[in-house]
Amino acid sequence: MSKSNGRVFIVDDDESMCDLLSASLERQGFGTSTFTMPQDALDALNAEGEIDAVITDVGMTEMSGFALCERIVGMRPGLPVIVLTGQGSMEAAVTAMRVGAYDFLTKPVDTKVLSLSISRAVQHRRLQEEVVRLRSAVAENKKPRSVVGSGVAMRRVYELIDRVAPSDASVLIFGETGTGKELIARAIHNGSPRTDKPFVAINCAAVPASLIESELFGHARGAFTDAKSERKGLFQQASGGTLFLDEIGELPIDMQPKLLRALQERKVRPVGSNAEIPFDARIVAATNRDLEAEVFHKRFREDLYYRINVVQIDLPPLRSRGQDVLELAAHFLAEFSRRGGREKALVLSNGAAEKIVHYEWPGNVRELENSMERAVALARYGEIMVDDLPDRVRAYRPNQFVIAADDASEVVSLQELERRYIERVLKLVGDNKSRAAQILGVDRRTLYRKLERFEEEKNANAGGMPPQQSAPAAPVAGTA
Amino acid sequence: MTAKAPASPEAFAYVTQQLLRQVAHDIRSPAGVVQNAIEELSQRETPEERAAMMVMANRGVRRLLRLADRLSMVAELQRGVTFDRQPGDLRNLVDTATEHALVLQGRRNVVLDRAIGDDALSLPLDARWLSAATCEVVSNALRFARSRVQVTMRPTEKSVELVVEDDGPGFPEGFDPGGSFAPREGVQGLGLSLAMAIDVCKGHAGDLRIHRSTLPPYRAGAAGAAVTLEISR
């Protein structure tokens, strides 16, 4: 056995007893330190961090074992103290328990019994530490973890979360892939009175269309070939808590009326069952699709859209979060440096920071996170250099639209300029079509038509290089 | 000369009760050492390790024997003792008694200094009782000391003073060695050693005094204990 069984302090003014207990426990895999003076043990406890248990004699000259136990429990609550005494009286046992002793053994002590008691004490302590760690993790989870960023755009999101979380209103989170929609959903749940109840998430895009109904609503036994037993659906599983419907834009069209009905009636009917079961779950949905456009194209039911979109939270894409990208990068570098066992967190070199700020981050925070993990793995110095970044980040040249080019080769057609301008506006407003249409001074339908046309042109030109990397940067003019 | 037992029957009953409890404790501790040393002995492979276990077991047995001696001496003191003072070498007696105390209560990080001279110091003494009293007082000092115990012998014209000092926590405020059968909270022992030593000193036409140690304290503001046994020539 290794010394990892635990580290134990032995306090007894009888040096022989200290030596014997130490020898016996060391042989059984415990690390020990012995003290013939209780005050020395207290001093050592103050100085040393990792102690799993203390064994103390009662009848000591400088301070009684009971007094020592009381002081240790006061200093380090949760550190188990095992009291050994030559007085096996009930009175002594009661005193031991009163001062917070974990166990009470009578001399002469059977070393096997002592070892068992210490093992239990060490296990008890480690479980307590685990509980503290988990509680701390839960508390940490309640914050919108990884939703790092103090820019204006994210501050608005935080404010909206704070306002909407305490209510039961349905929330639709809109954001591009990788913007952290589930983290926002969790933050809403954690900020709500439902926080102690389940948070159940389903990715509607990941469940086959044939299974999604039974997944959401459950099924009765024998409802279909594989339904060998009754199964509760996610609506029921989320009872009292929050049901997060991720990628709701991918929900099959024939499933949408069933979901709408369930949300309206607050009841679900499991597949193959005639009974309707009420549920009490808050609905938070998320999508990276423009659901207004989906409604426009009849791919998403308008009534369902309004049912789930009582409050909408638009998560800005990383490219429109300004300096948040550096804050996020620093956050991920610190995290991956820590996980990698580095004593000091890696930082971005000026060159790497410049690249990161200019890159568009189409995969948003998730792409940044992956890039930082890779960079930490490759880093050879205390800084992340440009070479440590992925090729696409290193090679990226900003796509700026041109209205003040002096060179004829740099000017573009009016149609291309329109495309670039519309794309630019959409990026600035986080792909919010309504807002973009408002800025552009056109109605939404016109904007959708134009976007469809751009898409068709893009498909027709498929095979060419992506526009971002197509040409060297043109002179900047009014890049908004 | 005769030493008397504690006065009232209530006090005697109380002391007896406390004494028995303390005796039970004092048996269990060294008995535990002996038992554990024997268990360890079977696990040890090298002769050195086995010898170390034997030393510990032996020490435990000695402490048990000393306890038996103390009990019989307390019983004798209760009954009344006539000290038989015969000419003897006090220096040699103190030397032997401190060695014995070291075997019983010596600790690796506590040093025992003896300033008792090299020459024989002859005076009338009851060797058995004076030896036991000296051993008790030095053993106590060794148990309480943080790092050092000093035994000094100071002959004067009419008597010899034996001063035992330690750098431990010292006596509690208001401590009265004469009434030391009263238990002290948080501190082991009933003061039997001092009570016995007082009787022995008085039996040698002397006295026992307690005071603050002159040794450097183990922490600021503290003062160790000092016990002076005075024995007339």
Image (cartoon, coloured by chain):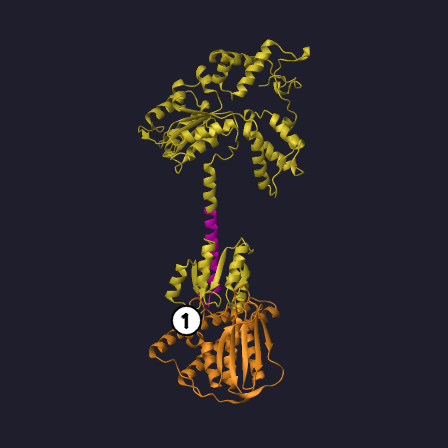
Q: Residue furthest front?
A: B157
Q: Can you say whether A57 is above or below A324 in the image?
A: below
x and y percentages locating residue A102 in the rendered image: 43, 58
Magenta-span inclusion, residue A312:
no
Amino acid type, residue under disc 1 in the picture = Pro
Q: Main secondary structure of the magenta part?
A: helix
Regarding residue B5, the answer to whether it shows in the image is yes
Q: Is residue A109 magenta?
A: yes
Q: Residue at x 50, y 87 (%)?
A: B126
Colour displayed for chain B in the image of the structure: orange
Identify by letter the chain in yellow: A
**Residue wearing tag 1:** B183
The quarter in which the N terminus of chain A is drawn is bottom right
Is A464 rendered above or below residue A44? above
Front residue (pair B68, B40): B68
Q: Nearer the viewer, residue B171 or A197?
A: B171
How many discs mark residues in the rendered view? 1
Tell me where residue B23 appears, x and y as whole percent.
Answer: 43, 74
User: In this picture, which residue range is highlighted in magenta?
Assistant: A106-131
Q: Quadrant of residue B11?
A: bottom left
Image quadrant holding the C terminus of chain A, namely top right
Which of the chains bears the disc numbered 1?
B
Task: Pick the residue in front: A71 or A361.
Answer: A71
Q: Residue reaching furthest left?
A: A275
Residue A23 appears left or right of A410: left
